[in-house]
Amino acid sequence: MDASSTGSVALIGPGRAGTTIALALTCRGWDVTAVAGRAPDARSTVAAAACLDAPVALVSEAGRGASLVVIATPDAAIEAAARAAAPSVVSGALVIHLSGSKGLEVFDAMLRSRPDVRVGALHPLQSFPSTSVGLDRLPGAWAAVAGDSEVRDLALLLEMRPFELPDSERVRYHATAAVASNHLVALMGQVQRMAEACGVPFEAFAPLARSSLENAFLLGPSAALTGPVARGDLRTVEAHLVAMSPGERDAYRALAREAARLVETRDSALDRLLEDVLESGAPPAGGAEPAGE
Ligand SMILES: NC(=O)c1ccc[n+]([C@@H]2O[C@H](COP(=O)([O-])OP(=O)(O)OC[C@H]3O[C@@H](n4cnc5c(N)ncnc54)[C@H](OP(=O)(O)O)[C@@H]3O)[C@@H](O)[C@H]2O)c1
């Protein structure tokens, strides 16, 4: 498969990720031979079939005539979908899933009945909240690939940056992606609550948050770290903990400890403060300086 390769793709699981991939392939001249969802009249099935200009099919018939079958159901349904589709898959066709947490083991049952089929996994390391946003985000996104070598070619065709991921590392990789994406969003939830508490608009923190993230990737997290933990400014950290709502302290302390891990010289007084100072009801040391960056 090269940049000008075309083929025919069947989509099982016509949600955000699957429809994005199928649409990106149609933009490159591919035909969509079938769209199969939970039911032929399910809303996402009908919408994706219209968007991809493709016929609706049952999962058990979806593989007919397709050189590529993309299974983009929720993770828990991949194995059963592969088993159900197995009899319809063309000999030599490639069947892939898009999951980050599942490996190639989900195809074991299908391969027992269809050893003539090739399998792989392609996990785009990007979030697709909708198909239109997803289409813009595919080019340049990294993608964890496994299985048949054609999966890598497919990623390149979609202008993604593939890297091989063995099944043995998949759970650790997926946990890392959860931290990079979900936990970052959760952290912004804390920023929103704390911004509201001090009467400053949440959006006011966007340039600071964005440039801090940029700096972390540009300079590396250790070099990018600024602020009271990087300066070893114990009294300011203590003042923060005292001033903030008690419900915010656990996350603040946990992340301040992570910040302290990035600082070369450990400060045992700061370590102790982050562990326990407010549990003992200790007052601030006084004289804390403003926390601005
Ligand atoms: N979205 C992302 O940002 C993203 C990024 C990378 C990878 N992925 C991976 O892509 C896969 C799909 O995720 P998604 O976010 O696209 O999910 P999604 O938007 O919820 O789409 C899942 C689709 O599968 C259908 N479905 C559910 N059970 C099915 C079954 N048993 N047989 C056939 N179709 C079934 C759903 O139908 P209904 O609508 O009727 O429920 C829906 O159309 C997952 O493996 C996920 O890890 C997603």
Image (tube, rainbow, N blue to C red):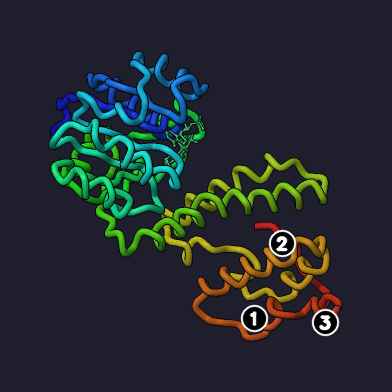
Nearer to me, 154 or 75: 75
Report the mark closest to the observer, 2 or 1: 1
Q: What's the distance in space between the residues labelled 3 and 2, CA to CA?
A: 23 Å
Label 1, on which residue?
Answer: 271
Q: Is the CB of mark 2 within 8 Å of ligand 1?
A: no
Q: Amino acid at mark 1?
A: Asp
Residue in the image at 45% along x and 47% along y: 76
Mark 3 secondary-structure assignment: helix
**Residue 104 versus residue 117 in the image, above or below:** below
Q: Nearer the viewer, residue 228 or 66?
A: 66
Point out the frontmost of discs 3 and 2.
3
Residue 293: % across, % down: 64, 57
Q: Quadrant of residue 48?
A: top left
Tell me the amino acid under the disc marked 3: Ser
Q: Which residue is mark 3?
A: 280
| Residue placed under numbered mark 2 in the picture | 291
* Disc 2 from disc 1: Cα separation: 19 Å
Q: Residue furthest bottom?
A: 268
Q: Quadrant of the N terminus?
A: top left
Q: Position of residue 81 (x, y in %)?
A: 36, 39
**Crowd around label 3: few <14 · some 14–19 · many ≥20 (10 Å):** few
